[in-house]
């Protein structure tokens, strides 16, 4: 897996959308790519959390209307 493929898999990893065998491969590659991979996964988690919070605020706003 090259780093671009790793980045694509990272987006699925943070939302839990990888199959168990894909998770194993992803984690091996995550270790192989080192800090660069850790930084990217951290960014993915941050974006995922920000999106979840935004979606939650939007859902709550609909209840108020």
Image: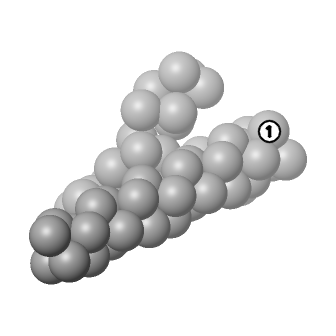
Left or right: 25, with 22 as reference point: right
Secondary element under disc 1, as helix, strand or loop, is helix
Pinpoint residue 58: horizontal percent, then vertical percent.
28, 62
**Furthest residue to the front?**
65
Occupied quadrant, residue 37: top right
Pinpoint residue 23: horizontal percent, then vertical percent.
39, 62
Residue at 41%, 59% (x, y): give it.
54
Residue at 52%, 33% (x, y): give it.
7
Pinpoint residue 33: horizontal percent, then vertical percent.
73, 40
Above or below residue 36? Residue 41 is: below
Judge by depth and name the residue closer to the eye, 43 or 9: 43
Residue at 42%, 32% (x, y): give it.
8
Pinpoint residue 41: horizontal percent, then vertical percent.
62, 51
Q: Which residue is mark 1?
A: 36
Left or right: 9, with 60 as reference point: right
Occupied quadrant, residue 21: bottom left
Left or right: 51, with 55 as reference point: right
* Residue 17 appears in the rendering: yes
Residue at 15%, 78% (x, y): give it.
63
Quarter of the image where the C terminus is located: bottom left
Judge by depth and name the residue closer to the eye, 4 or 32: 4
* Residue 30 appears in the rendering: no
Left or right: 56, with 3 as reference point: left
């Amino acid at each position: 897996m090259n780093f671009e493929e790793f980045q694509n898999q990272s987006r699925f990893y943070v939302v839990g959308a990888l199959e168990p065998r894909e998770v194993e491969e992803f984690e091996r590659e995550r270790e192989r790519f080192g800090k660069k991979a850790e930084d990217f996964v951290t960014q993915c988690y941050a974006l995922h959390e920000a999106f979840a919070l935004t979606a939650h605020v939007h859902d709550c706003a609909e209840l108020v209307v």
